[in-house]
Amino acid sequence: MSEGKKRDLRLMHLAVMALLIILFHYLPPIGQITEVGMNVLGIFLAVLYGWTFCDLLWVSLFGIVAVGFSGAITFPEFLASSFGSDTVLYMLFLFFFTGMISEVGLIDYIANKIISFKFLNGRPWLFSAFILIGTYISAAFINMFAAAIVFWEVLFIVSKRFGFQKKDKYPTLMILGVAMTCAIAGAVMPYKPVPLVILSTYSELSGVPMDFLKYILFALPITILITLLFIVIFRFIFRPDLKKLVDISVDFVDQSKMHLDTRQKAAVGFLVVFILMMVAPSLLPEGSFLSNVLSNLGNTGIIMLLLIAMFLLKFHGEPMITMKQLLKHVNYDVWLMMAFVVPFSSVFSGEATGIRETMVAVMQPLLSGKSEMLFITIAACVAVVLTNICNNMVIGAIFTTLIVTIGSSTGMNVAPVIAILSVAVNLSFATPAACPNMAMAFGMKDWCRAGDLYKYGVLSAILCLIFTLVIALPWANVIY
């Protein structure tokens, strides 16, 4: 019965999506938008509706097929620019690569190592900070879902051992803190899904190549500071009672996971090499042999080479990784969504649609004479609100298109705005729809009340947004 209702609901949403496309096909053009542009706009709204109320995977496939009938581009051309895109292929192999890092058990090692330091004994707030720091490291460089599960398990062990009851303030806040840290850590490395979508969309529209080194130099300190801000907010604003943790001792760590085995050391080596190769083009002299090799390979070629090496390596007679192990780490929802978003951003703002010209004509008078700070503030605030009710990758792609289109028309340097946007859309911890980790946190009904998560999450998002605008904007202008 429930499955039947689910099918009926999907059909209803599909009907709404189809009606939106048909409606915009027959509506008279608005402003400078062409008939083709109206078709593209209808597809955009239909897909956005589907992503919000249905599913990422099949809605993305629906969008890919629909664009082929828009008149802006043929279906084979869109397929070639979609699944043939370097960015889309890069994302697929990234899932393989980060899946290997997660598969070898590095997060378990980090979790036990980070809470094993003797100076944490008797220091409950420092211990809590180290839980979030360990979460940050694991989520930023490896896998945010695995990081959340492992560090929530640590939290549950601590809560039970030191007498906290389920739904007490401290475990509630730390469950939220781990989810929030995973969300903000998703903005750190440019190979993570949200920054990659935003940076690739910016590069596609502006013609400016992605500079991974500059982005890391911007995002790494900002996201670390936001993670530390969580502890400040928890301690001095939410103020849970930590008397039960006064005598905390770290002797409960799993000693069997305190040392890296050979396979894990190799994984760390591959991760370090990958990051170095990713930022090397920004550091090496232009025209040098190594610079030319890396440029010819591109990001996708680099990660393919590393994967080949992983497949060839053997430990104790067994391969370091198998294809069967890697396939289960591919997030097909996100990958197919990117396969639609990356090429669609160019179609959406292309000359054939007239959408870009209409947006500029509408927004330019509103922004004329306004400061860059006001523009960034408005963009960041609206993005944070929307990212807490919609998918943050979708909001990132949409706002990147808007910012590049409008900002470039006013002569603004949009690169710092794009960097700030990448962090802002990861302030997604006010609702269960904000990000997958928040949905997981809201699902822990035995451990925390939904009302508490809403209350603490909304206030945390507001305070972090203010902090980001005050700290991130000057830093972005320094880097860019």
Image (tube, rainbow, N blue to C red):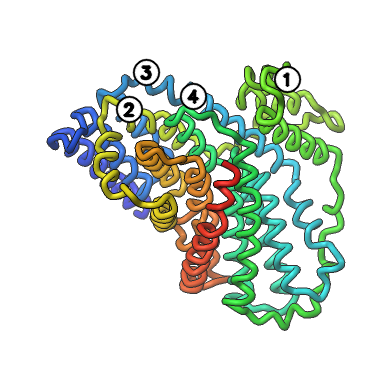
Q: Which residue is mark 4?
A: 85
User: Which sits in the foreground, 407 or 171?
Assistant: 407
Give the mark, 3 or 1, whose residue is nearer the N terminus.
3
Taking the image as shown, residue 56 lies to the left or right of residue 447, namely left
Image-based side of 467 in relation to 275, left or right: left
Cα distance, mark 2 to mark 3? 18 Å
Q: Is residue 390 above or below residue 73?
A: below
The residue that appears at 75% across and 46% down in the rendered structure is 105
The tag on residue 290 is 1
The first of marks 2 and 1 along the sequence is: 1
Q: Which mark is residue 76?
A: 3
Name the amino acid, label 2.
Gly
Callout 1 environment at 10 Å: few (<14), some (14 to 19), or many (20+)? some
Q: Label 2, secondary structure: give it.
A: loop
Image coordinates of residue 129 in percent, x first then y, are 70, 65
Amino acid on which the number 4 mark rests in the picture: Ser
Q: CA distance from mark 2 to mark 1?
A: 36 Å
How many numbered callouts?
4
Q: Which residue is mark 2?
A: 350
Q: Residue at x 28, y 24 (%)?
A: 72
- Closer-to-camera residue (70/330): 70
- Residue 30 drawn above or below residue 163: above
**Of the residues under marks 2 and 3, which one precedes in the sequence?**
3
Q: Helix or strand or loop: what does disc 4 sit on?
A: loop
> Do tag 4 and tag 2 residues touch (Cβ < 8 Å)?
no
Q: Amino acid at mark 1?
A: Leu
Q: Nearer the viewer, residue 376 or 455?
A: 376
